[in-house]
């Protein structure tokens, strides 16, 4: 970096990536799958480790940065970033005002809001066919986990219902300033072209969250909060939530959401 960047703020969960090899691998992982839409939003560019590489690509780049210090630093260090950096919070900014068409998302995500970033991406998924992002390894493992594993949970099911998840590579703490106390992982999410239809998305989210709400108990117990017990007689409800595949969750949620609709 040409100019010395401001120090990381703990309150913003900042750990700045300084390993140029890792930065290049992240951008390559994005460009390999970017497809026809060249619109890209970078979340939390910080001092610009990814931004400086993204600026060299033939894409329509916008960056969302909450820290005004970083915006000033980016504008001074990488003049090409001027007019491309938006002061705001990815969780609340009106994304449709940035791009009216589809766009990809990339970033070294702040650990303290990475799950919230994922939920926002899910909310906007029809506009976001691709995401390449850095997560705390523990969170990344949960997102990519398959049924039968202890790490399999709410994030796994909700993300995998809509996206194909690839666990690309691990990043060591030494690649950051300041180094975090945990390892990181880069994931790539690609929107599924063919996916099971979810009858009622709001009900599906509630169904999954309730199922894992008491994960040591059987589904019969955990789902009794939203479904009458006399409707939970099938042997599948003898299982625990972590034993059900994403497809099974979708099928069960669809069945009960339709029954609720008939009653209503």
Image (cartoon, helix red, strand yellow):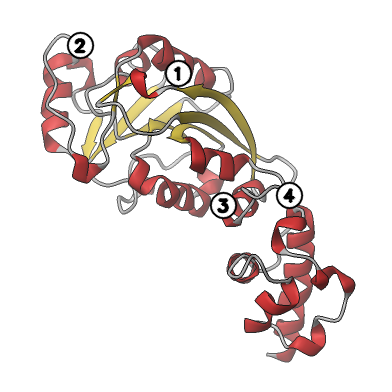
Callouts 1 and 2 close, C-beta under 8 Å:
no
Residue under the image location 70 percent in, 40 percent down: 193
Tell me: residue 166, above or below residue 239. above
Circle 3 Cα neighbour tier, 10 Å, few/some/many (<14 / 14–19 / ≥20): many
Horizontal arrangement in the rendering, residue 116 relative to residue 92 (left or right): right
Q: Quadrant of the N terminus?
A: top left
Query: For this rendering, which residue is in front, 95 or 218?
Result: 218
Q: Which residue carries the number 2 mark?
A: 1
Tell me: residue 18, above or below residue 43. above
Q: CA distance from mark 1 to mark 2?
A: 17 Å
Observer-side mark, 3 or 4, equals 4
Q: CA distance from mark 3 to mark 2?
A: 35 Å
Residue under the image location 33 percent in, 16 percent down: 55
Observer-side mark, 1 or 2, equals 2
Q: Which residue carries the number 1 mark?
A: 27
Precedes in sequence: disc 3 or disc 2: 2
Specify the label residue 155 is tagged with. Answer: 3
């Amino acid at each position: 970096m040409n100019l010395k960047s401001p120090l990381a703020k703990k309150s913003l969960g900042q750990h700045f990536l300084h390993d140029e090899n890792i930065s290049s691998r992240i951008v390559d992982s994005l460009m390999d799958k970017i497809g026809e839409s060249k619109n890209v939003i970078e979340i939390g560019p910080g001092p610009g480790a990814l931004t400086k590489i993204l600026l060299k690509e033939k894409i329509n780049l916008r960056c969302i940065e909450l820290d005004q210090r970083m915006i000033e630093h980016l504008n001074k260090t990488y003049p090409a970033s001027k007019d491309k950096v938006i002061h705001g919070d990815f969780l609340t900014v009106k994304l449709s005002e940035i791009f009216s068409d589809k766009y990809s998302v990339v970033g070294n995500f702040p650990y303290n809001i990475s799950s919230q970033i994922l939920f926002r991406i899910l909310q906007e998924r029809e506009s976001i066919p691709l995401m390449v992002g850095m997560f705390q390894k523990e969170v990344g493992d949960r997102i990519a986990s398959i049924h039968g594993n202890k790490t399999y949970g709410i994030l796994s099911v909700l993300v995998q219902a809509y996206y194909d998840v690839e666990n690309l590579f691990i990043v060591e703490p030494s690649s950051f300033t300041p180094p975090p106390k945990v390892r990181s992982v880069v994931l790539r999410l690609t929107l599924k072209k063919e996916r099971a239809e979810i009858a009622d998305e709001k009900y599906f989210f509630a169904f999954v969250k309730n199922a894992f709400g008491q994960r040591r108990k059987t589904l019969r117990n955990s789902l009794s909060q939203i479904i009458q017990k006399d409707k939970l007689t099938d042997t599948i409800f003898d299982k625990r939530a972590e034993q059900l595949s994403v497809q099974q969750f979708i099928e069960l949620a669809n069945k009960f959401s339709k029954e609720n609709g008939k009653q209503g």
